[in-house]
Amino acid sequence: MAEIISSFWGPVTSTTDCCEKNYAYSSYIAEFYNTISNIPTILLALIGLISAHTQRFEKRFCVLHLSIMAFAIGSMLYHATLQHVKQQSNETPMMWEILLYIYILYSPDWHYPRTMPIFLCLYGAIFAIVHSVLRFGIGFKVHYVILSLLCIPRMYKYYIYTDDVCAKCLARLYVATLLLGSLAWLSDLVFCNKISSWPINPQGHALWHVFMGFNSYFANTFLMFCRAQQCGWSPRIVRLMGVLPYVKIQKPKRQ
């Protein structure tokens, strides 16, 4: 939305400007709530990274948590500045993240294990270059949704083949946060003019960030559990400080 006070970063050059009033609190932060709402995503990804690293999960999970931290930091830069270059620092890691999900979901049954990471790396690199030149708008969103839909059949297969009640609960939390986050995002997008006239803006896009931060964490934890089962690491879901679920594994002595 239009600026309230002077802007440190100059005119808006991003292809998307959300419903939050620009520079309402500081000349250095364009969209205050949309910026700080990425903090939970970073913290949750950091917890996941520590869990994956200390328990010696496969490196793919460490990279996955790092990619989520990268796109959350990129999202902070984008919403703080509303500059096109910073927008790409959010969108390009988003694409790398979904390609990582595709790799983690499909690689266990891939008959040519070396071809998949090479293809996905090339795909991600080419997309980053093309996106920087052509500046995809709606095309980026459609592309991202299509790749995300490719993950659903595999996630559902993992769900139906998992007997652990707590792990299934993680999968259901993943779906619930996805639906709630999507509802918040769509409401902010579709009803922006009406919401802007309200005394208090519910900050739907910021809520989307928070819900999707938990969504990513639940998805990653569920996938770590499923992978640990495949590897015979006797996984179980425990709770950090009795609240936040994470995967605890027991590797065989020979490993």
Image (tube, rainbow, N blue to C red):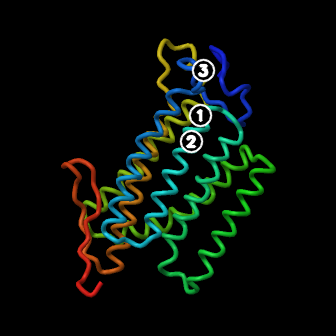
For the residue marked with disc 1, what is the amino acid?
His
Please name whichever residue, 162 or 230, is drawn nearer the observer in this view of the structure.
230
Please name whichever residue, 197 or 214, is drawn nearer the observer in this view of the structure.
214
**Disc 1 element:** helix
State the mark number for residue 75. Answer: 2
Label 2 Cα neighbours within 10 Å, binned few <14 / some 14-19 / many ≥20:
many
For the residue marked with disc 2, what is the amino acid?
Ser
For the residue marked with disc 3, what is the amino acid?
Ser
Residue 49 percent across, percent down from the top left? 39, 59
Residue 137 percent across, percent down from the top left? 73, 43
Up-down relation of residue 94 to residue 207 (above or below): below
User: Left or right of 97: which side holds 159?
Assistant: left
**Disc 3 element:** loop
User: Left or right of 161: which side holds 59?
Assistant: right
Residue 42 percent across, percent down from the top left? 44, 46
Residue that carries the numbered disc 1 in the rendered image: 79
Between the C-alphas of marks 2 and 3, the distance is: 18 Å
What's the residue at 58%, 32% (across, down)?
80
> Hey, which quadrant is residue 155 in on the image?
bottom left
For the C terminus, give its image quadrant: bottom left
**Disc 2 element:** helix
Between the C-alphas of marks 2 and 1, the distance is: 6 Å
User: Left or right of 42: which side holds 75?
Assistant: right
Label 3 Cα neighbours within 10 Å, binned few <14 / some 14-19 / many ≥20:
some
Between the C-alphas of marks 3 and 1, the distance is: 13 Å
State the mark number for residue 27. Answer: 3
